Image (tube, grey):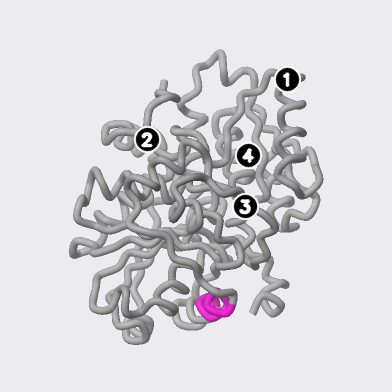
Amino acid sequence: MTNLEAVPDKQTILDAESRIREYVHRTPVMRCRTLDDLVGSELHFKCENLQKIGAFKIRGATNAILSLSDDEAKLGVATHSSGNHAQALALAARNRGIKATIVMPENAPGIKKSAVKGYGAEIIFCKPTTADREQTLERYIQKSGAILIHPYNDYRIIAGQATAAKELMEDMPDVADAILAPVGGGGLLSGTCLSARYFSSNTEVWGIEPAMADDAFRSFRDGFIHPSENPATIADGLLTSLGDKTFPIIKEHCTGILTVSEHAIRQSIRLIMERMKLVVEPSGAVTLAALLEYPEQFKGKTIGLIISGGNVDITSIPQIL
């Protein structure tokens, strides 16, 4: 079973990759000459929007669930999530044949609620606050005995998410000067940091988040976790605070955190849709937004960008844009 108390080492990530291989896609790495010319860099997009459940989260959820002992698995799993982790845990649980229960805020996107139900998970709705999510989940776990699979603050999750960056670096023809990853709770970014450290030690890793939800930027700057308070961004997957497992990894191994405007996020969604013909959710577009807002930072470099997901309600795209 995966060690729950230790930061994933190189072998842990290799084990996670082997464990989840038959349950996830090795997503393509795509190029776009127009976008290269626009920002003055060589861009390689890791398209996790084409992943199962439409986001990278299936990697961590699958690794966590397959790491459970048979006795643990019999108890079922539970979590709280506004969307992508909920879908990922629901599908991963179905793949192992165990029960999943998801605490979701009432205002979660309809497309994500429908997907969670479609994968066979039970949903318990709560008020859209971190406190109510956590309290509702805790009450359910105490009553049911279900195993908590946290959306990001879990080393099994981090090891699974790390496989996306590992694949990206393997599939780029040249060594990446930098990899850009969105940051909300930090599962993807901390995993990306570890993969870069173990598999491409000269590659910088930058976390990207909305300026209207800049708790990771402030946490990285000040050296302690700032809670996410009143975030107001269209990037609904990046609203959560860093965790006590993700933050130390990011603090030690991340090159820096950059914030991007809502305008740049919208512009990036439009560019990815128009030029690359890909559906991308706002949270997945922040990496390109960073290239638009900080072109000099990355000019002339070879950059890997993780498009973290594509779960967006098609009817909401005109409003988002």
> In the rendered image, which residue does mark 3 sit on?
228
The three-letter code of the residue at mark 3 reads Ser
Q: Nearer the viewer, mark 1 or mark 2?
A: 1
Task: Assign a secondary structure to mark 3.
Answer: loop
The spot of residue 124 in percent (x, y) is 79, 38
Residue 16, numbered circle: 2
Task: Assign a secondary structure to mark 2.
Answer: helix
Crowd band around label 4 with a 10 angstrom C-alpha radius: few (<14), some (14–19), many (20+): many
Task: Assign a secondary structure to mark 4.
Answer: helix
Crowd band around label 3 with a 10 angstrom C-alpha radius: few (<14), some (14–19), many (20+): many
The three-letter code of the residue at mark 2 reads Ala
The spot of residue 245 in percent (x, y) is 46, 36
> In the rendered image, which residue does mark 1 sit on?
142
Query: In the rendered structure, which disc, 3 or 4, sits on the residue that comes first in sequence?
Result: 4
The three-letter code of the residue at mark 1 reads Gln
> In the rendered image, which residue does mark 4 sit on?
90
The part of the chain drawn in magenta is 263-269
